[in-house]
Amino acid sequence: MLRATPRRVSLSPVTRLYTRRPVLAWAFYDWANSAFATTVMAGFFPAFFQRFWSVGVDPTISTSRLGFANGLAGFVVAVLAPALGAIADRCGRRKRFLIAWSLLGIVGTGLLWFVERGEWAWAATLFVVGSVGFSAANVFYDALLLDVARDDELDRVSAFGYALGYLGGGLLFALNVWMTLQPPRFGLADAAEAIRASFVLVALWWLVFMLPLALRVRERPGEVGVSLASATVQGLQGLLVSLRRVAHYRELALFLVAYWLYIDAVNTIIKMAVDYGTALGLPTESLLAALLMTQFIAFPAALVFGWLGDRIGARRGILIGIAIYTLATLYAFFLDSVVEFFMLAGMVGLVQGGVQSLSRSFFGSLVPEGKGGEFFGFYNMMGKFATVLGPMLVALVALITGSSRASIASLAILFLAGGLVLLLVREPSDTSRRGSSLG
């Protein structure tokens, strides 16, 4: 009796890439830590900090406290990032550093459950701890992109990570919003307890979905025989040398300037969109729903931008995203209804993940061999310092014009400036080799 031969399923090259174990494991870390970015940073913490942990305090004071906490966390990571990256490159422990900083962020986030009403100082401290852990771990996560993807795969793999991040962060955020709307269904006393429980869920989500990267991703070895102590000393000594070295790579230096300008505007929109909607008198429930919609639109859109980067080049893909962002900021000047706010959120969702993912892959294509952690440290440092110019511009325009609409529209200036500088950056294919010195 003849036995039928099972048919072999032929996977497309893209599917094979996304299902390759190191790539999938690496991308799932974005799924893991995006829960912190969505639920804690953008979603619940700012409002809960004002209404629960700073209860009875003038909103201006609460806002200043949160601003100082955000500023402190950003400054710490901005200062540490290049040194951390250089240390990891020398001793080949990018994955270990990622796990250690992630655990710091996980613990800081989970401990928010124990902070009682009015204990704003503890809440701010743990938020800083969580934010530092989150951002410092991303230095090594970004650098590991070069360990799991070839040069010709960077755009797609980077986009895949962002896409999973938006999906994972959005799913948990949707669950957390549901918990706050119907606390008894989840055995919780009220919305305040539901929000505190959501911080615990973020910590657990982050921990569990970090495990694939911890178990499956293999990094290239560092320098042979270099201990952690020696790597630390050498890394710190080489930091000033690295600063000069970045300046000698023309394309890298120009890209970092462009990235600083346009990503500052992106970060400002992420952090201030809900505040802007509130200032226009739109309902909080609608604003949270729009934030959720942005997450789920950004999931497929990031994948599309990865494909687009393969077809027309990462730089052109970023420029398309910048153009759409510019139109969105100008459109924000005129909106005055929930429907129009949802339209704005849709525009942002289409390009947010694409601009971020293609920026990371384009930068990765410019990085010299063996300098991933060190140079991605500078990349993350620029990202952290890119939280100052946009808010200051918005505040200054609001002060001069007395209009929140004009302040948001002013971000178009940063997008245009960043796009113009990016036009000066040559594609890696125009150079003799990735990261070659063009100074």
Image: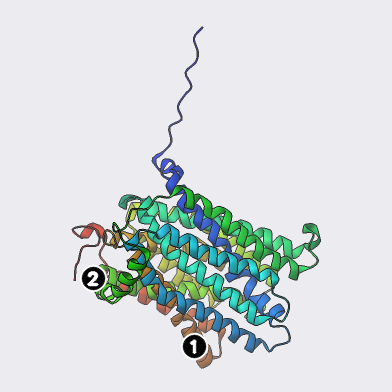
Inspect the image, locate mark 1, and give the three-letter code of the amino acid beneath it.
Val
Q: Give residue 364's mark.
A: none
- Name the element at disc 1: helix
Q: Which residue is mark 2?
A: 250
Residue 107 appears in the picture as rendered: yes
Which of 311 and 141 lies nearest the eye of the viewer?
141
Residue at 36% across, 50% down: 149
In the displayed structure, 360 sits above or below 275; it is: above
Q: CA distance from mark 2 to mark 1?
A: 33 Å
For disc 1, the neighbor class at 10 Å (few under 14, some 14 to 19, many from 20) is some
Residue 155 figure quarter:
bottom left
- Left or right of 228? Residue 392 is right
Q: How many marks?
A: 2
Which of 347 and 431 lies nearest the eye of the viewer?
431
In the displayed structure, 381 sits above or below 179; it is: below
- Which marked residue is nearer to the observer: mark 2 or mark 1? 2
Percent across and percent down for residue 418 are 36, 74
Residue 340 appears in the picture as rendered: no
Percent across and percent down for residue 175 are 68, 58
- Left or right of 157? Residue 285 is right
Quarter holding the C terminus is bottom left
- Left or right of 422? Residue 30 is right
- Residue with the most extreme top position: 1
Percent across and percent down for residue 16 are 42, 40
Q: Give residue 397's mark.
A: 1
Residue at 81% across, 66% down: 189
- Residue with the most extreme bottom position: 400
Residue at 45% across, 64% down: 138
Mark 2 or mark 1: name the one nearer the start of the chain.
2
Residue at 36% across, 77% down: 417
- Left or right of 345? Residue 137 is left
